[in-house]
């Protein structure tokens, strides 16, 4: 179910606006600038997801995911390599040393970060598409591949729409990515109803 170039551009701009708002909130939280990449929009089968992301140099082990339904069904994920996830938890937890593993408190920190970031993205999707979304409580996974985490929310056709955005915390060796899965039957209608602002806010 391929998207036209115009539909891909619309979806990319929608995600870009949401991520820009999320980056502003995240920058306030960490007190440092957050640099963003241009969203990469892709369509693939679920079993191709890990290979697609590996080809882009991604290796995710720490995943904060948030389910949503209502006007649109899917799952949004804030994904970190293990080292970056621990560094982020160290920064926000005001720890002197890099933790060897994420304890309950540090899990809670990353889940709250995911709640802020993913909430900004999904709020933008809801507002600009006019579709009311019900967002569930975010959860953290540190043991399963991204494709496995996504699989439990995939539609029977197993087609996923990926909106992939890299972010970099300034002066820190912290990288992450935002990946969204949308139900294939609903995303076209959402794209067609989106009313994008004339000028998108700066990230």
Image (cartoon, rainbow, N blue to C red):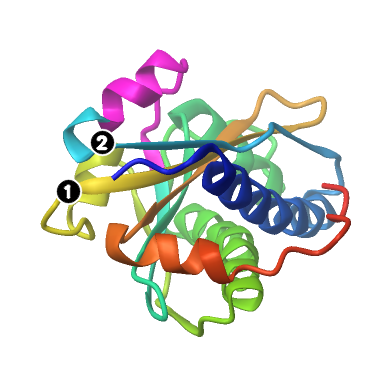
Task: Verify whether residue 169 appears in magenta.
Answer: no
Residue at (57, 35) in percent of width and height: 176
129 horizontally vs 58: left or right: right
Task: Determine the image quadrant of residue 142.
Answer: top left
Residue at (35, 41) in percent of width and height: 2
Task: Determine the image quadrant of residue 67.
Answer: bottom left
Task: Determine the image quadrant of residue 34.
Answer: top right
Dot 1 crowding, Cα within 10 Å, few <14, some 14–19, many 20+: some
133 horizontally vs 61: left or right: right
User: Residue 158, which numbered label?
Assistant: 1
Return the disc, 1 or 2, that comes first in the chain's sequence: 2
Residue 137, given in percent of the width and then of the height, sits at: 42, 75
Dot 2 crowding, Cα within 10 Å, few <14, some 14–19, many 20+: some
User: Residue 74, which numbered label?
Assistant: none
Q: Which mark's residue is nearer the viewer, 1 or 2?
A: 1
Q: Quadrant of the N terminus?
A: top left
Residue at (76, 51) in percent of width and height: 20
- The span picked out in magenta is 49-62
149 horizontally vs 32: left or right: left
Q: Image height check: is 162 above or below 37? A: below
Residue 49, given in percent of the width and then of the height, sits at: 28, 32
Residue 116, given in percent of the width and then of the height, sits at: 63, 65
User: Residue 145, which numbered label?
Assistant: 2
Secondary structure under badge 1?
loop
Residue sitting nearer the eye, 48 or 138: 48
Secondary structure under badge 2?
loop
Is residue 45 among the parts visible in the rendering? yes
């Amino acid at each position: 179910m391929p998207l036209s170039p115009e539909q891909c551009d619309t979806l990319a701009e929608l995600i870009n606006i949401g991520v820009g708002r999320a980056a502003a909130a995240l920058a306030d939280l960490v007190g440092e600038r957050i640099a963003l990449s241009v969203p990469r929009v892709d369509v693939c089968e679920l079993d191709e997801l890990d290979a697609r992301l590996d080809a882009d140099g991604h290796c995710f082990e720490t995943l904060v995911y948030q389910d949503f339904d209502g006007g649109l069904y899917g799952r949004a994920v804030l994904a970190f390599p293990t080292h970056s996830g621990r560094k982020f938890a160290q920064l926000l937890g005001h720890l002197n040393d890099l933790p060897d593993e994420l304890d309950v408190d540090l899990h809670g920190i990353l889940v709250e970060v995911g709640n802020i970031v993913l909430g900004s993205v999904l709020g933008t999707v809801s507002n600009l598409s006019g579709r009311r979304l019900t967002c569930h409580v975010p959860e953290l996974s540190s043991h399963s591949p991204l494709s496995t985490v996504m699989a439990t929310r995939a539609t029977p056709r197993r087609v996923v729409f990926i909106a992939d955005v890299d972010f970099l915390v300034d002066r820190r060796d912290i990288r992450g990515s935002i990946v969204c899965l949308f139900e294939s039957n609903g995303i076209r209608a959402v794209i067609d109803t989106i009313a994008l602002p004339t000028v998108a806010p700066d990230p």
